[in-house]
Amino acid sequence: MIARATELADRLMTFVGETSTLVQLMIVALAMLAARIVAWRLTPRVEARVRAIPNPDHNLLRVLIVLMRRLDWVMFTLFGSFSYLLMRVFSWPGSEYLVFTSLMLALAWLGLAIASQAIRNRALGKLIRVLVWTYVALILFGISDETSLLLDAAGFSVGNFRVSLLLIVKMFVFLGLLLWAAIGLGNFFEKRLQSSEDLTPSLGVLLGKVLKISLIVTAVLVGLSGLGINLTVFTVFSGAIGVGLGFGLQKVVSNFISGIIILMDRSIKPGDTISLGETFGWIRELRARFVSVVTRDGREYLIPNEDFITHEVINWSFSDALVRLDVKFGVSYDSDPHEVTRLAKQAASGVDRVYSAKPPVCWMTEFGDSSLNFVLRFWITDPRDGLTNVRGKVLLALWDVFKENGVNIPFPHREVIMKTPVEVSGAAPTRPPD
């Protein structure tokens, strides 16, 4: 290994000392300088052109933005290609190696920058881009085999299994690409299944989750087998890992199992209107660990699946969307309760969201301290649109109809009767002299 490294160092020193190498380095440096200057001048114009595109395709716009942010690399590829062609025509054969390599590296960097946009995680995309570009550079410079031997030499053995830096790098890149592809396919099929009209929402979510997990597990097994790793090696650690996961990930596993139970018994599904504790809203999405609930004020609560199993949940739209609401009110003792009942039902029937197929009813409930108390009951079919707002509309309708018909809503009052007279002692205050 040391002899091979010494040989590579000698070859590098010889290559750098050649006149053609110095000329190529100057050409590459001039091309990079010219590319920077041209890109600096063209960037505002290109940005204005991109902004002026009417209704651009989303994917096309992302590619254009990537190229616009790397306009100096684009210009370098143009200048590098022109320099390479000139050297091929007017120079001696083999003197353009460094220019060609620089051009290929620039093209590889641009291509990887565009391709990595498919990875949503920016940090992961950058890491994969750097690793792949480094591998391409090693191939172009002809030292990929030597680098592989160097990485493979740095390692240790676990029984009959050898762990090296080369294996770790391969595992990271290979498994990373397989997992990225599996998750992407899983998300694609999951959305298709959830939007299918032939499946119920809960069944679509369940099938999507099962398919996604199956793809991820398959990707891991295929990746490990493809790297030549014997899966029986992991049986040594399976017992300890299982116990550790059982205690450390107890809540995670509980939420995952609870999510499967929710999907199988179909107690809740996307679009249902629910109440859980102080949270009222509709279910936007069912995930492996939590349920996304959106409230009327736009807040999105991520509630663990376990809470839907262990706590009381009110599903306003479990069987159907019909929901009965109550509005309590009181009127003065001077009012006719029969007339009040008729007016209350008339007022509720005039509200647009009140379900007309089940007419409102109004009942007198008690003789209160200050008023005759009533309860007005009506039905709605759209609880997702809110409960407080429709109650408010009914109360306003009651106010209007009572005002029109002279029905008073009394203030609470109390009569105090003194059984013995109250004596007042003391003289009245005198007016001070002027």
Image: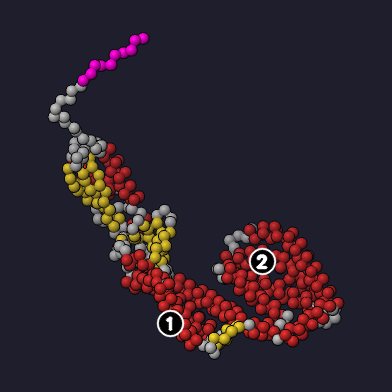
Report the colour scheme: secondary structure
181 within the magenta span: no
Q: Which mark is residue 67?
A: 2
Q: Looking at the rendered structure, which numbered label has been put on residue 239?
A: 1
Residue at x-position 32% and y-position 71% = 265
Residue 434: image x %, image y %? 36, 9
Q: Main secondary structure of the magenta part?
A: loop
Q: Residue furthest left?
A: 419
In this rendering, is residue 50 above or below 396?
below
Residue ID at (31%, 58%): 381
* Residue located 68% across and 74% down the image: 108
Q: Type of residue at label 1?
A: Gly
Q: Which residues are magenta?
A: 425-434
At numbered mark 1, what does the secondary structure look like: helix, strand or loop?
helix
The image shows residue 292, relative to residue 364, as above or below, that is below
Percent position of residue 36, x then y: 75, 63
The answer to whether one can see residue 5 in this image is: yes
Q: Is residue 112 visible?
A: no
Three-letter residue code for mark 2? Leu
Q: What's the mark number on residue 59? A: none
> Dot 1 surroundings within 10 Å: few (below 14), some, or many (20 or more)?
few
Q: What number of labels is visible?
A: 2
Please say if 232 is above or below 105: below
| SS assignment at label 2 | helix
Chain-order first, disc 1 or disc 2: 2
